[in-house]
Image (cartoon, coloured by chain):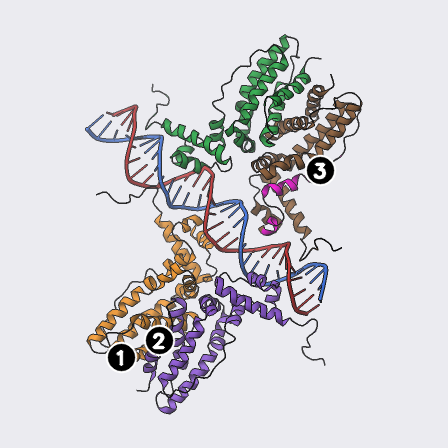
Chain colours: A purple, B orange, C green, D brown, E blue, F red
Amino acid sequence: MAAPDAPRGRPRDSRAHQAILTATAELLAEAGYAATSIGAVAARAGVGKDTVYRRWSGKAELVYEAVFTQTEAVPVPDTGTLRGDLTVLLDALVREFTAPGAAAALPGLLADFAARPELRARIRSQFLAPAKSRLVELFERAVQRGEADPDLPVDLVLDTLAGAVFFHTGLLGEPAGPQLAAQLAAIVGRGIEAR
Amino acid sequence: MAAPDAPRGRPRDSRAHQAILTATAELLAEAGYAATSIGAVAARAGVGKDTVYRRWSGKAELVYEAVFTQTEAVPVPDTGTLRGDLTVLLDALVREFTAPGAAAALPGLLADFAARPELRARIRSQFLAPAKSRLVELFERAVQRGEADPDLPVDLVLDTLAGAVFFHTGLLGEPAGPQLAAQLAAIVGRGIEAR
Amino acid sequence: MAAPDAPRGRPRDSRAHQAILTATAELLAEAGYAATSIGAVAARAGVGKDTVYRRWSGKAELVYEAVFTQTEAVPVPDTGTLRGDLTVLLDALVREFTAPGAAAALPGLLADFAARPELRARIRSQFLAPAKSRLVELFERAVQRGEADPDLPVDLVLDTLAGAVFFHTGLLGEPAGPQLAAQLAAIVGRGIEAR
Amino acid sequence: MAAPDAPRGRPRDSRAHQAILTATAELLAEAGYAATSIGAVAARAGVGKDTVYRRWSGKAELVYEAVFTQTEAVPVPDTGTLRGDLTVLLDALVREFTAPGAAAALPGLLADFAARPELRARIRSQFLAPAKSRLVELFERAVQRGEADPDLPVDLVLDTLAGAVFFHTGLLGEPAGPQLAAQLAAIVGRGIEAR
DNA sequence: AGTTAAGCGAGACGGTACGTCCTGTCTTGTA
DNA sequence: TACAAGACAGGACGTACCGTCTCGCTTAACT
């Protein structure tokens, strides 16, 4: 019995890995999602195309990892109110969606994910997972305070928050700042408070 | 006073126009947005590529017109409450976004619009215009009833509604029915009620 | 008994006719044969494309008429010797083939003629006809002087003269002057003298 | 001492190379020069268009190589007389110009070469080079025998021979056989004999 | 004077070819 | 086995030209 997957041959070069991610992020910010072709990324990273395809199966996966992976899932600080917590969460969401690379990547990236069933499923399971866990935590505190009902449709609320931010900033390109987070938190927060 | 621009030359063939729009809608429903190339549309419509480019400058404009033009701006019936009116409006929005062609087209189409500044501006001025006028009307009635404040951020509320529906159904592909409209109307309706 | 083909309807506009020929000659000299499209000719002449196609069935016929029609078949002056006569004839041929429009048109034009059987036959019957009649006249005088045999293969000699000039100047673009005519006349003249 | 240009990357596939040349020759013979488009060649060769453009910059270069490259520069056998040698050389020239593919290709091909300066220069340096070397050899023998002058204008004689054959057979499509070679050899041979 | 027929400028039409770009796979030599 | 390089088949892009057609209008000759 041999080890199930003993790595044989030359190990993968982690510098190539990082160079590809960096090149991807730069290209996205400079030229946009459409112009960020695998060939262009490889050329800028000084890497062969195969070295990209060996690690990612296509542009969407590559861009996803290049843009949305260093997001540390910082837990929402306990502000004491549902609305306060929502504001903090939305502020982080806005910042994440308006970062230089992300703003350029999101519309095309989400369209590519939505177009392929196996990727589409990953929007919720990967893209939204960190935000959802924070939202759940936030709700649990609100329920304990009696501010919210325990049977809130969490996924739908999350889709609303993400959809609103994405549509407003990602698609329409409206300027986004803390004020946006506050306004949305006000609307949605009041909308889900226990009556 | 002479007519400002007498039409010279052979007039455009309205049958070709219609054949292109029909072919576009069919291809979208059958093969999706990515596979709906100008060449494929022209071939299916029995038309030269020039005949397409003469009318539309690219795929995004063509698909937009093929999918989102027969939308009659039906005014929102007066249900007597803000939440009732919102439910009706959202129900129409959900139906519009989940129609066979629209569901296939929306993610890619909005990505293409967002990627080009001159098209991006048209998302609000054309895509959202009918919904906005209905939303404004609905708000005015609510303000008169004292249900809502007169200084509501209409655009932001509209972005929230559209973003929520688009994200939930268009991107994530979640099943959408009247229940979704009701839930969203409940959240957002309560969120903007006069306190 | 009516006239067999009484011209009915509006008669053709001779100014359009001339404008087309002029535009063709100018375009040939300025942009070459390949860039002399029917559409470009029509646009420059201020004329519809149909007005061109009504008179000429294609580019080759149009260019042929625009370039090789004002050639008056000046009879060869009687210099007293076969070689002298040949020199004069060749000098005219060189001048005809190196005129601004002709030089630009000839290679493409002859290729188009050669590619279509019905046009190919016209190379000899129209293109070469004037030169042939002059060559025949020249030969008859030489035969009478005893300088040449009466059974010369006139067509072949003509093909040789035309081919040599066309290849040397038209295809290779070698500078062509009276010296070329003299050299060719020397070679071919001596080649066909009675032994 | 390092190799000046180490070949990097995947080497070009010689089977694709050959398939393209074969497809080109077949298309020329079957459909003619005009219908021999790069796209049609690629399709018949089972090859992408890029694979053609990677090797040849256009139709003219491709056709030239497909048709005029297997010409082995057989030296002219020493028949003992200028006229005999010329007959042999012309016979080869006639055969070369009337081969199935060549006959279909030559007029259009030479027109395309003549239309572009950088290609035009190659008519003499590549097209005519083998024939010229044979003609020079032939002349040297004739000079040694005292049959010809040492200061013959070789290029002009070559242009005359090639022009005559091309015009007679290539453009006019006249039937060409050994008799044509003999007649031309008689005319030109006598024309350049030492007096 | 009214009718008829053709010419005319303009430009739309269905088709075909162009030359470039991108995709995802493959095949070299080198490490 | 990875890697850089780059060739490969396939297919879309947007442009140009072809030769035909369809408009509204004009210009004659024949009622």
Residue B121, image x, y percentages: 36, 62
Cα–Cα span, label 3 and label 1: 90 Å
Q: In which quadrant of the rendered image does the N terminus of chain D lie?
A: bottom right
Mark 2 neighbour class, 10 Å CA radius: few under 14, some 14 to 19, many 20 or more: few
- Which region shows up in magenta? D50-78
Q: Seen in the image, is A77 located left or right of residue A2?
A: left
Decide whether residue D51 is among the magenta residues.
yes
Q: Quick check: A16 left or right of B56? A: right
Q: Which chain does the numbered disc 1 sit on?
A: B
Q: Is residue B106 shown to the viewer in this render? A: yes
Mark 3 lies on a secondary structure that is loop
User: What residue is rendered at 36% in x and 63% in y?
Assistant: B123
Query: Are discs 1 and 2 less than 8 Å apart at CB?
Result: no
Instruction: Name the residue nearer the viewer: C89 or B27.
Output: C89
Residue B47 vs E3, above or below: the answer is below
Find the distance from the CA under tag 2 to the CA under tag 3. Answer: 80 Å
Mark 3 — residue? D71
Q: Where is residue C60 in the image (x, y as percent from the top left)?
A: 50, 32
| Residue B105 percent location from the top left of the image | 42, 63
In the image, what residue occupies the spot 67% across and 57% down?
Answer: D10
> On the image, which quarter does residue A139 sit in?
bottom left
